[in-house]
Amino acid sequence: VFFVETREVDIINYYDELPSPESGVKADVKIAKGLGLMIDGARLHNPWLNYCLPMHLCQTLGICSNILSQAASRPLSAAEIRDLCNTFIGEVPDPGVDLGTFLDTIDMLMSNDE
């Protein structure tokens, strides 16, 4: 794992492309992007998500790391949002089946946290 603390896309691309047939590197390289870059991407693609340092630490430690990584690259699917909620706040229903119940459950779980 390389921890890259930068917002420079060229640097990120270098490490993303490192394991390729052209480079001769055959290692399994995973890039943990810096907090600033992850915040920028999450704001762009998932503005509802408050991507912050505790979430970033979870991502770098492998807790929901794939979903959190994707949050900085594209809008999350309903199933990914549910998985993220199930991990961080508790069991929630499928938002694809009943969005109202999903949102009510989140409100209830979050009010219990106060």
Image (cartoon, helix red, strand yellow):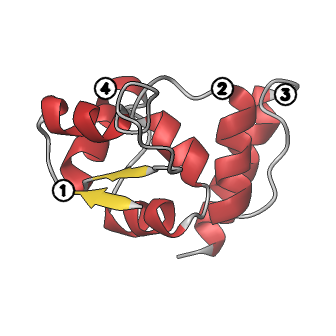
Q: Nearer the viewer, mark 2 or mark 3?
A: 2
Classify 10 Å Cα crowding around label 2: few (below 14), some (14-19), many (20 and above).
some
Mark 4 sits on what residue?
44
Residue occupying the point 62% across, 63% down: 88
Residue occupying the point 51% across, 70% down: 61
Q: Is residue 83 visible?
A: yes
Q: Residue furthest front?
A: 24
Residue occupying the point 59% across, 45% down: 66
Tell me if residue 67 comes above or below residue 54 in the rendering. Answer: above
Q: Secondary structure at mark 3?
A: loop
Which of pointers 1 and 4 lies earlier in the amino acid sequence? 1
Question: Which label number is shown at residue 37?
Answer: none
Mark 1 sits on what residue?
5
Q: Is residue 89 visible?
A: no
Which of pointers 3 and 1 lies earlier in the amino acid sequence? 1
**Label 3 to label 1, Cα distance in Å?**
39 Å
Mark 2 sits on what residue?
77
Q: Nearer the viewer, mark 2 or mark 1?
A: 1
Residue occupying the point 57% across, 29% down: 76
Amino acid type of the residue tagged 4 in the rendering: Leu
Amino acid type of the residue tagged 3 in the rendering: Asp
Nearer to the camera, 19 or 93: 19
- Relative to 37, is 79 on the left or the right? right
Residue 12 sits in quarter: top left
Q: Nearer the viewer, mark 3 or mark 1?
A: 1
**Label 2 to label 1, Cα distance in Å?**
27 Å
Amino acid type of the residue tagged 2 in the rendering: Ser
Residue 18 sits in quarter: top left
Mark 3 sits on what residue?
98
Q: Secondary structure at mark 4?
A: helix
Which of pointers 2 and 3 lies earlier in the amino acid sequence? 2
